[in-house]
Image: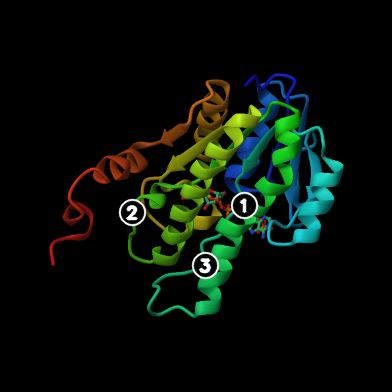
Amino acid sequence: MRIEDATVLVTGGNRGIGKSLVAEALARGARKVYAAARNPEAVTNPDAVPVALDITDPASITAAAERLTDVDILINNAGVHLGGEILVDELDKIRREMEVNYFGPLQVSRAFAPILAANNGHLLTINSGLSWAVVPDYSSYSATKAASWMMTNALRLELVAHGVGVTSLHVGWTDTDMVAHRSDEKVPPAQVAREAFAGIEADALEVVVGEGASQLKAALALDPSVLYGAR
Ligand SMILES: NC(=O)c1ccc[n+]([C@@H]2O[C@H](COP(=O)([O-])OP(=O)(O)OC[C@H]3O[C@@H](n4cnc5c(N)ncnc54)[C@H](OP(=O)(O)O)[C@@H]3O)[C@@H](O)[C@H]2O)c1
């Protein structure tokens, strides 16, 4: 799918990876880039079109889909890390994280699927190395990203007949507010954005960014004790 002259919608386009995705789409010659945000005034890129969109609010999603019928490329990027340990955290918090990271992109994808089909479009979801493994303090988050990964695969199955390509992007620690408290080596968000659009242009089914996510993917094929230790 060509980015040049395409119309792109990025959820959570006001900061973090989303902000870099908006900048990269514009740099690659997209005709129009909708930077969706809960608060559109938080969108600072003067060349983007700010759009109000809370991915957990059905009315907000319907209003966006009714207006933005020219979208060729949808990027499900918005997400949160709220939880730590699933035996300790309040269930409400764990549900809220699933609401944003799984039901959010699912509802947005359902609303925009007919538009993408009409425009022979493409959908990319920002998933994670933690779609494939759990690390301490990311138990419930990893479950949401595993669900989102499988949602992306299911969307691919269901959208292929409608001429819509679907890409699942997986990245490890990335240098944004979400993991600002961590001292790990981090991937620059601009690199995630570059590899995301290269993947869309190549119609890639999957894009794995950085060494951390690659290692977690490889570990999936090994005995679980490699990741979680022996009992
Ligand atoms: N950073 C990492 O290490 C990392 C690694 C792998 C995958 N990811 C994934 O990458 C994506 C972007 O994360 P990030 O690192 O850029 O995080 P971030 O800097 O915290 O930004 C999160 C974005 O999501 C938006 N958002 C949160 N809840 C929303 C809602 N209900 N409706 C609409 N927008 C909402 C935020 O908007 P507000 O400004 O209104 O809060 C913000 O724009 C997420 O899906 C995350 O899970 C991140």
The quadrant in which residue 75 appears is: top right
Task: Look at 52% across and 56% down and name the residue there.
Answer: 178
Q: In which quarter of the image is the N terminus?
A: top right
Q: Nearer the viewer, mark 1 or mark 3?
A: 1
Task: Look at 55% across and 55% down and name the residue there.
Answer: 177
Nearer-the-camera pick, 43 or 196? 196
Task: Report if the beta carbon of the residue with label 1 is closer than 8 angstroms to ligand 1.
Answer: no
Task: Look at 72% across and 42% down and name the residue there.
Answer: 112
Q: Disc 2 or 1, which lies upstream in sequence?
A: 1
Report the residue marked by disc 1: 106
Provide residue 209's location: percent of width, then percent of height: 42, 35
Provide residue 52's location: percent of width, then percent of height: 80, 52
Q: Disc 3 or 2, which lies upstream in sequence?
A: 3
Gap in Å between the C-alphas at discs 3 and 2? 17 Å
Left/right placement of residue 87 relative to residue 174 reads left
Report the residue marked by disc 2: 133
Q: What residue type is labelled 2?
A: Ala
Left/right placement of residue 43 relative to residue 161 reads right
Q: Can you see residue 8?
A: no
In this view, 7 is above or below 147: above
Left/right placement of residue 45 relative to residue 217 reads right
Q: Which amino acid does label 1 sit on?
A: Leu
Provide residue 97's location: percent of width, then percent of height: 55, 65
Nearer-the-camera pick, 71 or 115? 115
Q: Disc 1 or 3, which lies upstream in sequence?
A: 3
Q: Is mark 2 on a helix, strand or loop?
A: loop
Q: What element carries label 1?
A: helix
Tell me, yes or no, whether the two marked residues, 1 and 3, touch with CB atoms within 8 Å.
no
Q: In which quarter of the image is the C terminus?
A: bottom left
Q: How many marks?
A: 3
Report the residue marked by disc 3: 82
